Image: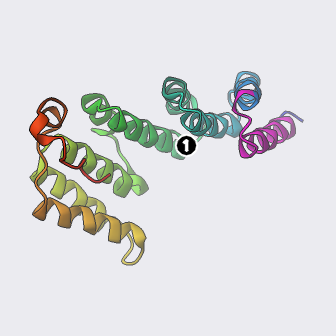
Amino acid sequence: TQAEEASWRYGQLVALIEAQDYAQAERHGSRLIEEFPESGYAGLASLLLAQAAVQAKDLELAKRHLQWAMEHAEGLEVARVARLRLARLLLHEHAYAEAMALIDGIEADSFVAPYEEVRGDLLTAQGNRETARAAYQKALAALPPFGTNRERLQMKIDDLGTLQYPPAESRKTNGANTLAKEPPS
């Protein structure tokens, strides 16, 4: 009955998020996590709540949900997805060292491609183009031979060879670089 209850609550959470009722979703999802923390639904609920928090522009709440999923999710895959999403969120906030610490030294198995892509994005944002290229190439090598992910990664690799990005610090402080575009993500 507990599994059924957790499943039902998770379905309700999905419906609330689809209806964009983020406040109610937060209350409902937090209750699910609190009452069924060891169910597989708790980790999934935490991922959904993080997504809803991003949509509601509450990045701190999103980070808390992702951190919870990383530390407590029942399945390793859910924890890896949470880690990856948190790294991307930190990249967005220019917290490069924090984001890199999340993905460094992690055995990624089937997540090699997305982890290496985020590593490449972090390195590109910091102006470390050659190491970024190596990360993107490692990500590309881990993907199946066809698909849009391959095309996106190849574009990132190609951009490293042709575009010149000033370091992130100079984009923020140097008025002469106000027209410089952000590196692709």
| Residue 69 at x, y percent in the picture | 55, 32
The answer to whether residue 95 is left or right of residue 44 is left
The answer to whether residue 155 is left or right of residue 16 is left
Q: Residue furthest right?
A: 1
Is residue 11 shown in magenta? Answer: yes
Disc 1 residue type?
A: Val
Residue at 36% across, 38% down: 92
Residue at 51% across, 39% down: 79
Q: Secondary structure at mark 1?
A: helix
Q: Say if 103 sits above or below 23 in the image.
A: below
Dividing the image into 4 quarters, which one contains the N terminus?
A: top right
Please name whichever residue, 69 or 48, is drawn nearer the observer in this view of the structure: 48
Please name whichever residue, 70 or 10, is drawn nearer the observer in this view of the structure: 10
| Residue 127 at x, y percent in the picture | 13, 44
Q: Main secondary structure of the magenta part?
A: helix
Residue range highlighted in magenta? 3-23
Please name whichever residue, 134 or 20, is drawn nearer the observer in this view of the structure: 20
The answer to whether residue 39 is left or right of residue 51 is right
Is residue 16 shown in magenta? Answer: yes
Residue at 54% across, 27% down: 58
Residue at 18% across, 47% down: 180
| Residue 54 at x, y percent in the picture | 54, 36
Write down the residue under mark 1: 78
Q: Residues within 10 Å of mark 1 (few under 14, many from 20)?
A: many
Please name whichever residue, 106 or 62, is drawn nearer the observer in this view of the structure: 62
The answer to whether residue 151 is left or right of residue 179 is right
